[in-house]
Image (cartoon, rainbow, N blue to C red):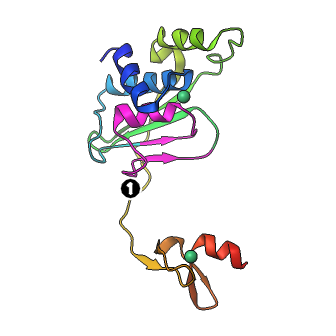
Amino acid sequence: METRELMKKATIFHGHICPGIAVGVLVAKYVLEHGFERSSDEELVVVVETDNCSVDALQALLGTTYGKGNLIHNDYGKNNFKIYSRKSQKAVKLALKASVLDSKKLSRDEKIQKLLDQEPEDLFDIKEIEFNPPILAQIEESVPCDICGELTMDSRIMRYQDSNICIPCYKEIK
Ligand SMILES: [Zn+2]
Ligand SMILES: [Zn+2]
């Protein structure tokens, strides 16, 4: 798919056009052109180190979504993207080059255009990495919180004076 078509699809999902989406589109473009297929189930796992607009392009174009559990956010505040394919057992990391966004004189539209005119290889440091994806989403038992009664994943329940308490309730009584 052409960059422009990918951009259109991602923008519809995201809601507006912005430089972040353009960055995400170029990540997706590289991935789709290098033997990774869009993930209808959990074939792909993506680990991002940012929660900015770019992540929405990956959700829209790669099928790696928060709800399916194959989109994982490490809150490091970096424009780094790791993509794992369970099918091919391959993995790749794209790291946005420092020079890319330092063009402060450009307007927002000029920035978007400049990004889209480039190839992923110009924008990112790209390297193959070891295939060791994080554990995939697991179905877990839920238990009711002894205070509010709401069903809560077992791993998120706090034990307090022999009671099972959810995190928000625990914060209130502490
Ligand atoms: Zn945006
Ligand atoms: Zn509760």
Circle 1: residue type: Leu
Quadrant that contains the N terminus: top left
Across and down, in percent, residue 112 comes to 54, 14
Please state if 49 lies on the left or on the right of 57 as rendered.
Answer: right
Quadrant that contains the C terminus: bottom right
Segment tinted magenta in the rendering:
46-75
Query: Considering the numbered disc 1 on the image, is that residue within a helix, a strand or a loop?
Result: loop
Badge 1: few (under 14), some or many (20 or more) residues near its Cα, within 10 Å? few
Query: Which residue is pictured at 39% across the width and 75% down the height?
Result: 141
Q: Quadrant of ligand 2?
A: bottom right
Q: Is residue 138 above or below residue 152?
A: above
Query: Which residue is pictured at 32% across the width and 42% down the height?
Result: 89
Residue 9: image quadrant is: top left
| Residue 86 counted in the magenta span | no
Across and down, in percent, residue 170 comes to 65, 76
Across and down, in percent, residue 125 comes to 53, 23
Q: Nearer the viewer, residue 45 or 132?
A: 45
The number of numbered discs placed on residues in the rendered structure image is 1
| Residue 66 counted in the magenta span | yes
Q: In the displayed orientation, state which residue is furthest to the bottom.
A: 162
Across and down, in percent, residue 74 comes to 57, 47
Q: Nearer the viewer, residue 80 or 51?
A: 51
Query: Which residue is pictured at 54% across the width and 76% down the height?
Result: 157
Q: Which residue is mark 1?
A: 136
Please state if 148 lies on the left or on the right of 15 as rendered.
Answer: right
Q: Is residue 87 above or below residue 109?
A: below
CB of mark 1 near ligand 2 (< 8 Å): no
Query: Which residue is pictured at 57% across the width and 25% down the height?
Result: 96
Q: Is residue 101 above or below residue 10?
A: above
